[in-house]
Structures are given as structure tokens and as C-alpha cells.
Amino acid sequence: MGPGRYAIVLVVAIVLVAHPVRAADVTEVPEGVSTEAVKAFRGGLALHKEKQYAAAIREYERAIALGGRFPEAFNNLAYCYRKLGQLDRALDLYKTAIALRPTFPQAHDYIARTYLAKGDRTMAMRHYEIVRRLDARLAHCLLEAIRRGDPEYNDMPWGS
Amino acid sequence: MSPAAGRRVTASDLGLLALRVGLAAVFVVHGYVKLFGGHDRTVALFMTVNIPAPEVMAWVVGVLELAGGLALAVGLGTRVAAGLLAADMAVAIARVRWPQGFLGAAEFEVVLLLACLALFGTGSGRISLDAGLSLRRSAR
């Protein structure tokens, strides 16, 4: 086999190996998190869906204390604080979620809404620009929320 | 040492080839994905971690990883490619991975950085285009 054919085989191999690479499903708890932390996280999620935010916060904080330092836990915790009106606490937690996974679309969506609630449209737009590149559907809703100046517009609860 | 002995392939050359091919596979795949499968995602990442000119840098890094990986695979300009890829990894660690911790996060990029630095120091070894070109030059 000549060098040209080797090159073709190499290019085909690269395409086959690289093309199916996609973002991981972010709705799942990552591997390596302790069973207790997962249980607490799931408990928080159930309460969160029932809109029992204060109780959900306790469970999420317990999950994090048990070693569940994964982005979904911080994102959900931030969501609950935001719903209880504790915007600065929510911002800090969203920043942690984003530091743990910089391409986490929901965390960027929610932090944009939190900035909007605080009246910081510039930061909201900055995160919108990031969401636009990660998730078109989320971005569409977020842009409408920013246009209306309404952070609650079409705010889809995480995990629903 | 006779010229013939200088051309003899050693176990070190095989080790360097294995290192180059392993690194090349990782960088080529990541470069390809940045350029053709996840450009927007890369831009979003760069915007999040405050990389200047994220649109341009996403292309630059994609090309660097794809072309640098291919260069490592064939052993052409190995020191330059390894040095640039080491710088790429240093930025990735500092701006993205280190805040996420070491285990399950920065560890992979740290290994890539150190492996690139190793190749930067040693060069490609004898099983490479660099060595072939060097032999041709010395034969003239």
C-alpha cells in the first residue's frame, strides 16, 4: 500500500472515530458519586419538582456535603435559591456549576435570568450569547425573557 | 560511532513512536471535533473562560490540534508541534480544568502537557520524517 493510500485510511479513521463524539447527557448524575450523595440529590430533585424549594435546598446541600460536587447539584441548588429570592447566593452557585462544566447550557440560561432579575442586562446578554451556541431552543426562550425583561418567562425547571 | 550505527533503530525510538502516535490520536480527534463537529461548543467554552477573540481562537486551536497531531504522528517538526500543543494544554489546564480539580478533571490534560514537554525535549526519534530528512541532508 502506497503512502497516498495510508493517508486516505488515516483520514477515514479520523472521521469515523471523531464524528460520533457528542456532548454527554447532562441529566444524569456522573459516575463516581457516592450512593448517599446520589440519594440525597434525587431526594432534592423530587422536592424541587414539587416546588418545595427550602426542603430541596437541604437535600442538595446534603448531596454536595456527601461529595456530590457535580454541576447539576450546584445548578439545582442555585435554582432553588433563586426561586426563594436569594439572588446573590444563586449567582455564586451558578458560577460554581459553570466552573465545573463551562458548557452547561442550563446553568448559563439560569445565570442569565438571575442577572436579569438583578437588572444586569449586559451580563444576561453575555450568557445568552453562550447559550445561543450550546442550545438553540433554550436560547430562543432566554432571548424572549431578556426582551420582555421578565426572568420568569418560560423558565423551565431543571429536571422537568 | 559509524554512520550505520547512528541510523539503527533502538527501543527508545520505538518508545518515542508509541508516545507520538498516542498523543497524535488524542489531538487529531479533538482537533477534528473542534473544527467539524463542535465549533459552536468550543466558542461557548472559550467565551465562558474569557479566552480573547473566542471565534478566531476556536479555529486556531482546532487547526493546531489537528495539524499538530498529524505532525506528531509522522514525526515532522516534532519539537515545534509538541511545544505548541504543550502551550495549548497549559492554557486548558489553567483556564478550564484546574478549577474542576485534579482527579477526573485536570489529570488528563496534565499528562498530555507532560508528554508534549517530553517530546519537546527529546525530539521525534529515528522513526520519523524529521530523522529521514536529517539523514538526507547529512548524505548530501
Image (cartoon, helix red, strand yellow):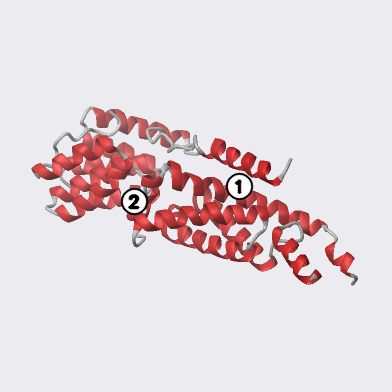
Viewer-nearest of discs 1 and 2: 1
Does residue B45 lie above or below A53 as drawn? below
**Hey, what amino acid is under mark 1?**
Ala
- The N terminus of chain A appears in which quarter of the rendering? top right
Q: Residue at x 20, y 54 (%)?
A: A123
Q: Is residue A61 something that shows in the picture?
A: no
Does residue A136 lie above or below B127 as drawn? above
Q: Residue at x 57, y 60 (%)?
A: B113
Q: Residue at x 27, y 39 (%)?
A: A57
- Using the image, name the chain to which the residue with label 2 belongs: A
Residue B95, image x, y percentages: 41, 59
Q: CA distance from mark 1 to mark 2?
A: 32 Å
Outermost residue toward the front in this view? B140
**Hey, what amino acid is under mark 2?**
Thr
Q: Is residue B27 something that shows in the picture?
A: yes
Q: Nearer the viewer, residue B135 or B116?
A: B135
- Using the image, name the chain to which the residue with label 1 belongs: B
Q: Is residue A42 left or right of residue B97?
A: left
* SS at badge 1: helix
Task: Check disc 2 and report the residue beneath it.
Answer: A96
Q: Is residue A13 left or right of residue A129?
A: right
Query: Would you call the spot at circle 1 few (<14 residues within 10 Å), some (14-19), or many (20 or more)?
Result: some
Residue B16, image x, y percentages: 72, 57
